[in-house]
Image: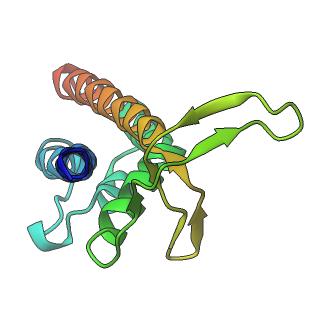
Amino acid sequence: DEEFEVFAVAKIASEANLIAAINITRNTFDIFAQIANELAVPKPLHIKDCTIGKVRDGLPEGKLRTELTRVTKLHWFQYLAGFSNTIKHRQLISHQPSQKYEEGTGEYLGGGAQVAAFKYHSREFKSYWVKEVLEGTVEMHNEIVILGITLNEHCLTPALP
């Protein structure tokens, strides 16, 4: 009973931390969109219509638009967006004891909690280990930093006459 209780608490903490990490990272892109909209879009969008995709499309050609296009096409960006919209309606994280082995070689690949496969709009996302999703989330956090640097450069570069 005591071990079960410890596992139950760890399971809840793991789920909460994963969901928080994903949502904070995904929401940071929304905040970035608001900032880029005000600083870099020639005709800023109304606040209700300000999404990362609409800001990207409203930017003039240049490095900032290119970087934003690149990032929004990344698998982990799309995964985080789909996850954060799907998790509101359905449980995706499983903490059933599980192990994974390489097909063909039988090499042990790991064990632990998994995020279930899911579909968001027309895109299907495969199942991942929680650790893999956290690593993808960190990758996207690093992309926000790159976008911030690119936005700074955009704002500090004088406009050509």
- Furthest-front residue in view? 1
Left-right relation of 161 to 103: left
5 is higher (above) or lower (below) than 71: below
Left-right relation of 55 to 74: left
Residue at the spot x=18%, y=51% of the render?
Answer: 5
The one nearer the camera, 90 or 145, is 90
Q: How is the image coloured?
A: rainbow
Image coords of residue 85 (percent x, y) = 32, 69
Image coords of residue 65 (percent x, y) = 40, 41
Left-right relation of 1 to 134: left
Residue 32 visible, this angle: yes
The one nearer the camera, 73 or 104, is 104
How many numbered circles are shown? 0
Residue 83 lies in what quarter of the image?
bottom left
50 is higher (above) or lower (below) than 158: below
Image coords of residue 146 (percent x, y) = 32, 24
Residue at the spot x=12%, y=45% of the render?
Answer: 35
Residue 82 lies in what quarter of the image?
bottom left
Left-right relation of 151 to 136: left
The one nearer the camera, 146 or 161, is 146
Residue at the spot x=48%, y=37% of the render?
Answer: 132
The one nearer the camera, 58 or 99, is 99
Residue 161 visible, this angle: no
Image coords of residue 158 (percent x, y) = 20, 22
Name the image quarter holding the C terminus: top left
